[in-house]
Image: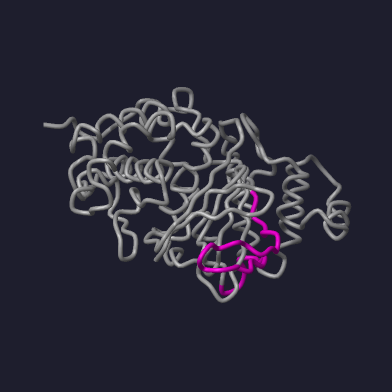
Amino acid sequence: MRRAGWGIAGAIVIGCSSRTPEAPVRAGSGDAGSGAVADAGSDAGATRSVGPSVSFEEALGVIHGAGAAGRARAEACGEGDESARVRCLLADRFSADREAAAMADELWTRFGTVAGVEVAHTMDGGYRGSIQIVPELPIGVERKHLGWVVSAMRDFDGFFTWLAPPAESSSYRFRALSFRFMRSVKKRTPTAYAHDWTIAYNLAGSLLVSEDATRETLFHEVFHLNDGAHGWWSGRALASAYDAIVAKCGQVATCLAPYAPTETMVKGGTYYAFHANNGVVEYAAELALRYYREQRAVQRGAKLAKKPFKCGPAENARTWERMRDEFFGGVDKTSPCP
């Protein structure tokens, strides 16, 4: 498994090709804004917006594209309000697979999130060469991927509801997203990349092999989107601690081990969070994933796999507290350190 970042001409993206990269590279971008779209229920006919939302025009571009064919479908879905028209677009796009259509409808009606396809393009994959990206719907044998996305969104919804009441929670945004499904031709990277509240999802991605692996990958990606929306907070708030750790340990895994938020390793190298080509943004995303893992264990009444991250070196406690306060409303339900 590999994780890496990728830049596409005309856009800067955060990308995670998987969990053990060979030589990842990242570039980042995000737009301002945070919040969520209220859960309208799986049988609701419209999404009640209480924050950012995906407009009909944005949804059309994700579902059908912005060309003449897409405009024709938009005209065919001209009845009702914007939410009803998006549901119409989704029903039409996923008409070949009734089960997938129901999943896409749930993503929209419950989470204000749109499922569609990526734009065909050729990606500069660095030393891996050019990577051809082609759009592909998650239907038929690939329907499981759409199911894993829906499962992840349900989990995030329950997690953030448990973490803090809606009126008291932070503005961490995990709804009102766009998922663009695609496939890399003759390659398994990148697994995913994120930009502008959009996650591109590779049906051939090396990491997306199970429901749990997909859920954790998506949490990592969603953090990147929120970090960008906070003006790349990670670079301002965590860089000094991160740089001090790297200055002390370099790329030596045994030295870095106490500071690594997750067990993810670079193939033939060191911890993913500290890989030389990643930088503090990937450390931050792995720290967010560790936060999610630990709080989720408490939510489920499970024993932590290891001692809380905050109970390690002093640097861990500092970065943990800063992330907790910036993104998660200052909530930490793990036990105090001895």
Q: Residue furthest top?
A: 168
Q: How is the image coloured?
A: one colour
Query: For residue 72: magenta?
Result: no
Q: Residue at x 44, y 23 (%)?
A: 168
Q: Answer above or below: position of 266 versus 237.
A: below
Q: Position of residue 40 (x, y in %)?
A: 60, 39
Q: Position of residue 162 (x, y in %)?
A: 38, 35
Q: Tell whether 294 sits left or right of 188.
A: left
Q: Which quarter of the picture shows residue 290?
A: top left
Q: Which quarter of the picture shows residue 111?
A: top right
Query: For residue 124: magenta?
Result: yes
The quadrant of the rendering that contains the C terminus is: top left
Q: Position of residue 280 (x, y in %)?
A: 40, 41
Q: Residue at x 56, y 59 (%)?
A: 201
Per the rendered image, the range of residues in magenta is 114-141
> In this view of the protein, which residue sits in the foreground, 226 or 46?
226
Q: Residue furthest left?
A: 338
Q: Residue at x 54, y 44 (%)?
A: 28
> In this view of the protein, which residue sits in the foreground, 12 or 114?
12
Q: Which quarter of the picture shows residue 322?
A: top left
Q: Tell whether 69 sits left or right of 7.
A: right
Q: Tell whether 147 sits left or right of 95.
A: left
Q: Tell whether 258 sits left or right of 35.
A: left
Q: Answer above or below: position of 255 versus 64.
A: above
Q: Answer above or below: position of 290 versus 315.
A: below
Q: Position of residue 194 (x, y in %)?
A: 56, 49
The quadrant of the rendering that contains the N terminus is: bottom left
> In this view of the protein, which residue sits in the foreground, 171 or 275?
275
Tag count: 0
